Image: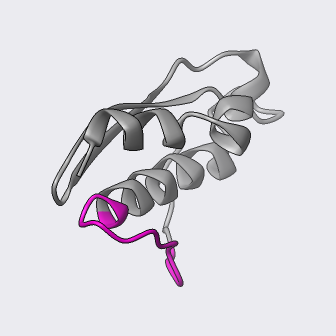
Amino acid sequence: MDFEKLKELRNVGFNREVGIVTAAISEGYARVEVEIGPQHVNPIGSVHGGVLFTIADTTAGAAATSRGRYMTTMSSSMNFLRPA
C-alpha cells in the first residue's frame, strides 16, 4: 500500500476544515495531529468534546484503512472525565 498517497487522501475535506493532519500512517497504525486554536474551544475555554472525538475517530479510521481497504468507523463512544 502507498502510505504517502493514503496520508494525502486523509488530509482533505472535513479533516482539513478542522485542521487535522495525518502525521504518520503504516499498517495498523495512524497518528493524527491538530493545532488547537480558538475555533476548537467551547464556551468555557476548554477543547470542545466534538474536536476530541473527531481526532479519535479520524485516527481509528486511518488505522483501519491502512490495512488496505477503505472503511469508516461504525460505532464508538467516549466518556469525558474532565476538561482537556
Name which quarter of the figure residue 18 lies in: top right
x%, y% of residue 39? Answer: 78, 23
Q: Residue at the spot x=49%, y=68% of the render? A: 78
Residue sitting at the far bottom? 75
Please tell me whether the stretch drawn in magenta is mainly helix, strand or loop.
Answer: loop
Task: Please tell me whether residue 11 belongs to the stretch shown in magenta.
Answer: no
Q: Is residue 54 left or right of residue 30?
A: right
Towards the viewer: 76 or 67: 67
In the displayed structure, does residue 42 sit left or right of residue 67?
right
Q: Is residue 71 left or right of residue 66?
A: right
Mark count:
0
Percent across and percent down for residue 67 are 24, 66
Depth check: 33 or 50 in front?
A: 33
Q: Can the viewer see residue 84?
A: no
Residue situated furthest right in the rendering: 43
- The vertical placement of 30 against 45, above or below, is below
**Image quadrant in which you'd find residue 4:** top left
Residue at x 49% of width, y 49% of height = 82
In which quarter of the view is residue 12 placed? top right
Residue sitting at 45 percent across and 54 percent down? Answer: 56
Which segment did they paint magenta? Answer: 64-77
Give whichever of 64, 34 is nearer the camera. Answer: 64
Name the residue at 23% across, 52% down.
1
Is residue 3 visible to the viewer in this orientation of the structure?
yes
